[in-house]
Amino acid sequence: MKLITWNVNGLRAALKKGVKEWILNEAKPDVMCLQETRVLPDEQLTAKEREVPGYETIWNPAQKKGYSGVSTWLREAPLDFSLGLGEERFDVEGRVIRTQHPDFYLYNIYFPNGQRGQERVGYKLAFYDLLLETCDELHAAGKSVIITGDFNTAHQRIDLKNDKSNEKNSGFLPEERAMIDKYLEHGFVDPFRVLYPDREQYSWWSFRGNARANNVGWRIDYFLISENLMPRVQDVIIHDQVTGSDHCPVELLID
């Protein structure tokens, strides 16, 4: 099974850059998770733009136009799905789609960015906590979970080029990194880092300073999976050669 996550930084712009063609003609995933779609699909996309041949599509846009939003595209219809985390202050921003599959739950998530001040860092950490509570309940019930999307946090120093200069910036704050540690303590693993403990590879680059050409990036788009799923993982691939956004697609191959 092939699952791909991609923050497209505005779906309407990304469609003009060939993102859908790459997904449908080259990548051909079983499940495609998009973040930061920034679109109200029924109002702002044409019927042709909304059409994804061979896939069922689920959308969770933000209430605010041009902001946030996620979409999951699936070759096979899920057993069930839900939108949001059940708390209005998070759900109005259109950040979560959960789909139920025969042997796992999949979360497609656009985690909050804390760059706009301490208040948003607190909001981001509260979002992480609420999600983990739900995942703990699923684990306690014997369920397996896959979380994917734009985590907006680089976990370790190896996960960004300029770690020293970003120690006081959101995305690499100690309290944000500690949240990823907490998930790993609660039965999750980062399969990319398990498979490639020393690989320096990134999934996001600033538009400024020719960062992508110089590979001055961050690894903030990834998969966290329940520990019991790790033996089934075949590979995790960061498609850093694929353009169309300031993020690149990340792929999980799992039996």
Image (spheres, helix red, strand yellow):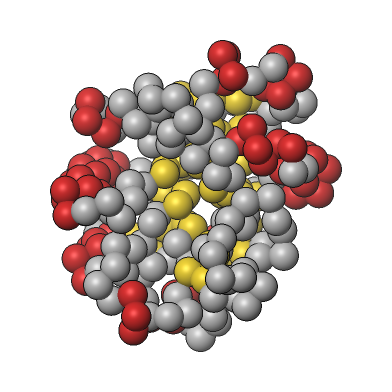
The residue under the point 25% across, 72% down is 168
The residue under the point 71% across, 58% down is 242
The residue under the point 34% across, 84% down is 164
Asked whether residue 132 is in view, the answer is: no
Horizontal side, residue 29 vs residue 236: left or right: right
Q: Position of residue 8 (x, y in %)?
A: 58, 45
Question: With respect to residue 205, does 90 lie above or below?
Answer: above
Question: With respect to residue 201, does 101 lie above or below?
Answer: above
Question: With respect to residue 224, does 198 lie above or below?
Answer: below
Horizontal side, residue 34 vs residue 148: left or right: right
Q: Position of residue 81 (x, y in %)?
A: 44, 26
| Residue in the foreground of this view, choosing between 126 and 75 | 126
Hey, which residue is sitting farthest front in the picture? 209
Quarter of the picture holding the C terminus = bottom right
The residue under the point 33% across, 63% down is 171
| Residue in the foreground of this view, choosing between 13 and 125 | 13
Quadrant of the rendered image containing residue 67: top left
| Residue in the foreground of this view, choosing between 188 and 107 | 107
Q: Position of residue 188 (x, y in %)?
A: 35, 60
Quadrant of the rendered image containing residue 86: top left
Q: Position of residue 100 (x, y in %)?
A: 46, 32
